[in-house]
């Protein structure tokens, strides 16, 4: 299994489906797809499931954003 390739396919699938979201959610769906498209690198080798990678990185992004909003962000 090549998780990097699987991530690319997952991002492509999500990209096609984003347009079916409610109008006010489309921009957030596009942001998620872009987040997945940027995820490349050796850390992907530690995951077996591209959906698991997506959940981990989306959750990290949400947590970083929340900390930044509170002024607690530590890169």
Image (tube, helix red, strand yellow):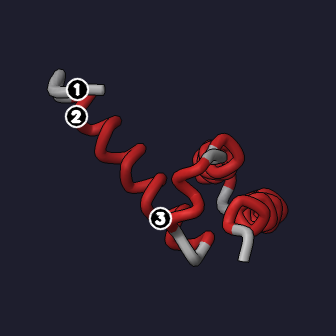
Q: Position of residue 25 (x, y in %)?
A: 60, 53
Mark 1 Cα shell of 10 Å, populated few (<14), some (14-19), many (≥20): few
Between residues 62 and 48, which one lies in front from this camera angle?
Answer: 48
Between residues 43 and 12, which one lies in front from this camera angle?
Answer: 43
Q: Position of residue 53 (x, y in %)?
A: 53, 64
Sequence order check: which comes first, mark 1 or mark 3? 3
Up-down: is 30 above or below 45? above
Q: Which mark is residue 67?
A: 2
Mark 3 Cα shell of 10 Å, populated few (<14), some (14-19), many (≥20): few
Q: Which residue is mark 3?
A: 55
Sequence order check: which comes first, mark 3 or mark 2? 3
Quarter of the figure with the N terminus: bottom right
Quarter of the figure with the C terminus: top left
- Kindly indicate whether the residue at mark 2 contacts the one at mark 3 (C-beta within 8 angstroms): no
Q: Is residue 20 visible?
A: no
Up-down: is 68 above or below 12? above
Q: Nearer the viewer, mark 1 or mark 2?
A: 1
Sequence order check: which comes first, mark 1 or mark 2? 2
Q: Which residue is mark 1?
A: 74
Q: Which mark is residue 18?
A: none
> What residue appears at the point 23 percent right and 26 percent down from the top-left corner?
74
- Kindly indicate whether the residue at mark 2 contacts the one at mark 1 (C-beta within 8 angstroms): yes
Mark 2 Cα shell of 10 Å, populated few (<14), some (14-19), many (≥20): few
Position of 57 with respect to 28 (left or right) is left
Q: Quadrant of residue 63?
A: top left
Q: CA distance from mark 1 to mark 2?
A: 8 Å
Position of 56 with respect to 48 (left or right) is left
> What residue appears at the point 67 percent right and 67 percent down from the top-left corner?
3
Label 3 secondary element: helix
Q: CA distance from mark 1 to mark 3?
A: 21 Å
């Amino acid at each position: 299994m090549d998780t990097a390739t699987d991530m690319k396919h997952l991002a492509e699938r999500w990209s096609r489906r984003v347009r079916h979201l409610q109008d006010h959610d489309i921009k957030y769906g596009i942001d998620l797809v872009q987040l997945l498209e940027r995820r490349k690198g050796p850390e992907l080798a530690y995951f077996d499931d591209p959906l698991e990678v997506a959940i981990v990185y989306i959750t990290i992004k949400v947590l970083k954003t929340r900390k930044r909003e509170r002024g607690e962000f530590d890169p």
